Image: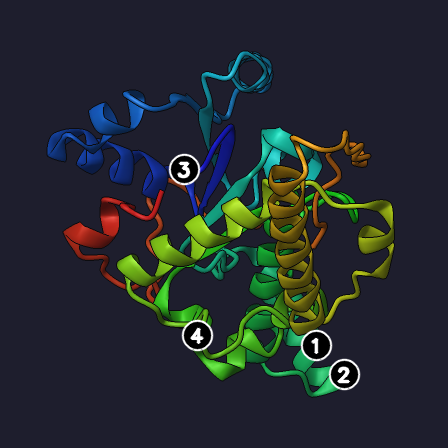
Amino acid sequence: SVPDGIVTFFTSYQYMEKTIAHWDEMGIIRQLLAHKLIFIETKDVVETSIAYDNYKRACNIGRGAIFFSIARGKVAEGIDFKGHYGRCVVCIGVPYQYTQSHVLRTRLEYLLTKHQIREADFLTFDAMRQTAQCIGRVIRSKKDYGIVILADARFAKNDKRDKLPGWVLQFLNEFNVSITTEEALSTIGRFLRQMGQPFSQQDLDSIQLDPIAAIEIIKTHLVQSNKNKNLLHSNTKTATTQHSFSENNHLATQDDDGIPPDDYVDNEDVKMEEDDLSMSGL
């Protein structure tokens, strides 16, 4: 299971409310509450601020919490979930803009007329930009780390995946795309165990964006750590061995016109099966 804080982004308020209601009928909300507290972003700024403050308190005391929010809402645009406040981010659905907005229609016509940019290309690019914005809420520095779950099959399509920034795209390899829930849980567990190990400043400084290089550093660190433990165990009766470890540094790896109104349903939204709605990967 993921420790501390989890941030979940939905495509609209209506979609979020319907999904939460469905989870409640299935008993999933009750299961989640057994492990973490749940807080929800609303259209009221004061209510959302209070929810966010309580969310942080729950993470600080070790209770853990989940924050349900909107991809184009206030949380996605201006609140950071650094450190233990955001150990996992889940994006449910592709956050397309509301295409019937008069402002957006005018912008699309201008882009097509003046720059020959097709409507579909711009909307997809904008949705992926917003997705990257949501992901970036939990990865705030080189020392920060977190799990990213893109819970929509459309993210695996080349026309969408290729529009994600490089710092996200580099981790979407064949081993992490279109995997089963069991495979995801196994990957998450392995990742969290690795991140729970202390790292020296030298290891941290040598980590690059290449995930393969990062994995090799982790493996080397774990092997050396095991050797040190074995050496310490064999010499306890004859000598006192001093080990110095660095502090626990870890691997880093709006309401606006874009939010669909409550009565809008995106034609591209795929129907999620009940086992997907359970978000058992959390």
* Label whose residue precedes the other's in the sequence (3 or 4): 3
Vertical side of 34 occupied by 117: above or below: below
Position in image of residue 148 (x %, y %): 52, 53
- Residue in the image at 79% along x and 61% along y: 207
Cβ–Cβ under 8 Å for marks 1 and 2: yes
* Label whose residue precedes the other's in the sequence (3 or 1): 3
Residue 180 seen by the camera: yes
- Residue in the image at 54% along x and 11% along y: 61
- Residue in the image at 46% along x and 22% along y: 64
Q: Which mark is residue 114?
A: 2
Position in image of residue 1 (x %, y %): 38, 38
Cβ–Cβ under 8 Å for marks 2 and 4: no
Q: Which mark is residue 111?
A: 1
Q: CA distance from mark 3 to mark 4?
A: 24 Å
Q: Secondary structure at mark 4?
A: helix
Which residue lies under the disc numbered 3? 13
Q: CA distance from mark 2 to mark 4?
A: 31 Å
Q: CA distance from mark 1 to mark 2?
A: 5 Å
Which residue lies under the disc numbered 4? 156
Viewer-nearest of labels 1 and 4? 4
Q: Secondary structure at mark 1?
A: helix
Vertical side of 156 occupied by 32: above or below: above
- Residue in the image at 27% along x and 58% along y: 182
- Give the amino acid at mark 2: Lys
> Of residues 33 and 8, which is closer to you in this image?
33
